[in-house]
Amino acid sequence: MVEQDENGVGPQHGDDLAGAFGGNVRRRREEAGLTLEQLSAQSSVSRAMLSKVERGEKSPTIGIASRIAHALDASLSDLIGAPGAAASGVAMVLRKKDRPVFRDPETAFERHIVSAAPGAGGAEMIFHHLPAQVSTGLLPAYPPGTEKQLVVLEGTLTVAIGGISETLDAGDSMFFQADADHGFANRTNTPCEYLMVILRRT
């Protein structure tokens, strides 16, 4: 379960990361030599929205954030920012309180980076919290060679990819090639939480 405070609100890292996310988007855009207009065309996100995101004035939804990341040839985790993991000998430790969290401002969907060293070996581990009756919508395809594996920790998850739909209950797992548009939905009246591993072989 995602920890909540007395007001029923989870970790505030997502709000804190809005400025960092926007700054990373601007940095990656400028490194790529793209204008706001060009990034808008490539991501199908309006120039006005991109400008607000870059200034940290607007927190994007998961769909918009994903389209921006793919247009910049970056992972969503790259734009959210690296976790504050601490080195200890040959190990890296990421404390729960230090997890970078992306929170969708419209649906309260949460994406927690739980990899202490994201990208090590080409793999990344993500924890998702999907509230009742919430869907991510279709997310853009990843580059060929990207694989996703997930296991449902709590609740019921419906995964749509490549024209098919699979419903998974707690304890069920799934593997798929992520080079097609795909999305995740919780069609029940209770929250769903699942752990995902993203492997990039490109």
Image: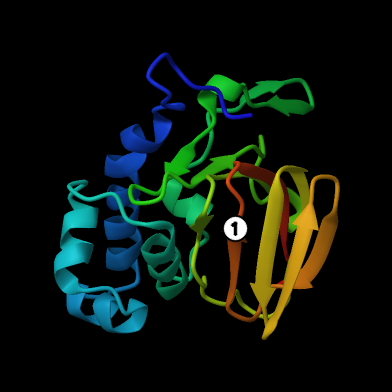
Q: Which residue is mark 1?
A: 187
Residue 73 showing in the rendered view: yes
Residue at the location (49% across, 22% down)? 4
- Badge 1 marks a residue whose secondary structure is loop
Q: Is residue 170 left or right of residue 46?
A: right
Q: Nearer the viewer, residue 187 or 70?
A: 187
Q: Quadrant of the C terminus?
A: bottom right
The number of numbered discs placed on residues in the rendered structure image is 1
Residue at the location (34% across, 51% down)? 106
Q: Position of residue 31 (x, y in %)?
A: 33, 65
Residue at the location (55% across, 23% down)? 3
Residue 124 showing in the rendered view: no
Furthest residue to the front? Answer: 189
Q: Is residue 23 left or right of residue 57?
A: right
Q: Nearer the viewer, residue 167 or 78?
A: 167
The chosen color scheme is: rainbow
Q: Position of residue 95 (x, y in %)?
A: 62, 21
Q: Is 181 rendered above or below residue 89?
A: below
Q: Position of residue 27 (x, y in %)?
A: 30, 57
Q: Position of residue 180 (x, y in %)?
A: 63, 81
Q: Quadrant of the N terminus?
A: top right
Q: Is residue 18 left or right of residue 175?
A: left
Residue at the location (58% across, 41% down)? 113
Q: Nearer the viewer, residue 16 or 85?
A: 16
